Amino acid sequence: MARDQLVVLNALDVAKTQLYHFTAIVIAGMGFFTDAYDLFCISLVTKLLGRIYYTKPGAPKPGTLPPNVAAAVNGVALCGTLAGQLFFGWLGDKMGRKKVYGITLILMVLCSLASGLSFGSSANGAMTTLCFFRFWLGFGIGGDYPLSATIMSEYANKKTRGAFIAAVFAMQGFGILAGGIVALVVSAAFDHAFKTPAYHENPAASLAPQADYIWRIILMFGAVPAGLTFYWRMKMPETARYTALVAKNAKLGFSHQQKQAALDMSKVLNVEIEVEEDKVRRIAQEPANSFGLFSKEFAKRHGLHLLGTTSTWFLLDIAFYSQNLFQKDIFSAINWIPPAATMNAIHEVFQIAKAQTLIALCSTVPGYWFTVALIDHLGRFFIQMMGFFFMTVFMFAIAIPYHHWTLKPNRIGFVVMYSLTFFFANFGPNATTFVVPAEIFPARLRSTCHGISAAAGKAGAIIGAFGFLYAAQSTDPKKTDAGYPPGIGVKWSLIVLGVINFIGMLFTLLVPESRGKSLEELSGENADENGGEQQAASPRTAPV
């Protein structure tokens, strides 16, 4: 049987949508805007970095980053993100969501600015500095994942909670779009100011000395949106669920914590909320609310749930990040972006940014907001299963007749099919894998479990980023990029991604439906000792 809900938590569950909900979405969402900008803007400038630091005099084609350098530049921020998700996820449950939230933002601002600096003008100096600061940038970004999701889930009402958490994540789409727009504006301005010939006309003159500023400006701009939200992030009160259910052993004392939770939410909701010390004390002493992450009880109640959230996020990110980070390579393979030798360095940045901005505008951003609009109507499980299904279908539809799409008359068809895989990633598992871990675990472990799930995703992203670099190389040794061994080609790489998406459908069966239930009902925190097991999230049942 379920116990009566605490008044302060029930008030949050049944609250009408009001200004504080939207304020929380904007504050948390701007963090995700910055996260996406910082993680994906590197793909806009890697070819420029290759031209600046690795072009050999007299070579028939402009320089490209050597395989080990390209892997490091593309993947080091993801490694930092994985570490940050685990560390800050754990810290968010120990110290509180609000305290840790500010630390991650400061780290993101400082490392965004530092990413555009370099020690010396040599290739080794510039790349080492870039990788060092992008690792720590990723570390800060990693903390934003569990903290933003947990804060939004704990502030939201149960009726529209899915939409609110998805709206925070949807700001990722605008971050990707903003990266493309900033690159377009900066490259267009430099291209207009510094006229240079194409590489095949004059290799030395095709790279304006001022082009070195372009990648620095694009990377450093990520500090702007993060810095703008720092004040508001520090003004947010701690979530009532953390204060009431988790912070009970803090130095200020048990009674103070309950009064603080009621006081904070009274201000937020503009209603008077009574303090319920005795009820909270009883809940805290229940065995169901004291087991740890590595206990048999956690494995029994939430083990399959954690396997479901980690495996689906892992599989999704292999496909999602390999597609995002290597759009430019796929577009070059089908000749949608002209050959590098026919452009100067600045114009190449413009062409790559134009292609990625178009994809973001037509498929990535709309996909996110379809999820926001429909997640509390269709449910998390349905959207995730549907997304994986259509990603599988469209990936195979691109890969199997791959030669057909490389022909010039069919390029538009390729871009449409490729865009649809992005649309259903975002109107699908890319959003739901972020939402569900913030809902189904107990408050004292919520941030940690979300961090573990997100870190599994980043492990998939690292495999996608590093693996696709090598796998997508041509099977013909003469056609590979400089320094790379032959791979399996773009066609077979896309087929592998399609198979991975199909496996994601199977693991989605482990993920429970959380639509329309309170967080305490899903996690079993408001269940008595006899009914605790029944109150934990049950697979895919929700009120209509």
Image: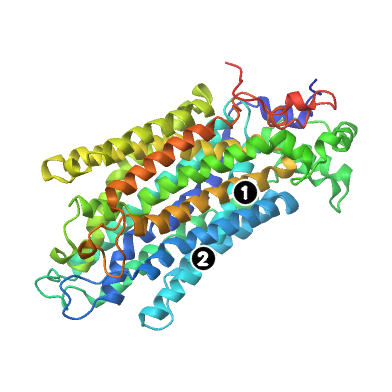
Between discs 1 and 2, the one toward the N terminus: 2
The N terminus - image quarter: top right
Q: Quadrant of residue 445?
A: top right
Q: Which residue, given by chain and number where applicable, does mark 1 sit on?
A: 452
The label shown at residue 135 is 2
Residue 317, position as x, y percentages in the image: 46, 46
Q: CA distance from mark 1 to mark 2?
A: 18 Å
Q: Position of residue 306 (x, y in %)?
A: 64, 40
Judge the density around disc 2: few (<14), some (14-19), many (≥20) Cα neighbours within 10 Å.
many
Q: Where residue 174 sits: x, y (%)? A: 40, 46
**Observer-nearest of 259 and 535:** 535
Q: How many marks?
A: 2
Depth check: 412 or 274 in front? Answer: 412
Mark 1: secondary structure: helix
Position of 236 compared to 359: left or right?
Answer: right
The residue drawn where x is 63% and y is 60% is 103
For residue 350, the mark is none
Identity, as a three-letter code, of the amino acid under mark 2: Phe
Q: Nearer the viewer, mark 1 or mark 2?
A: 1
> What element does badge 2 sit on?
helix
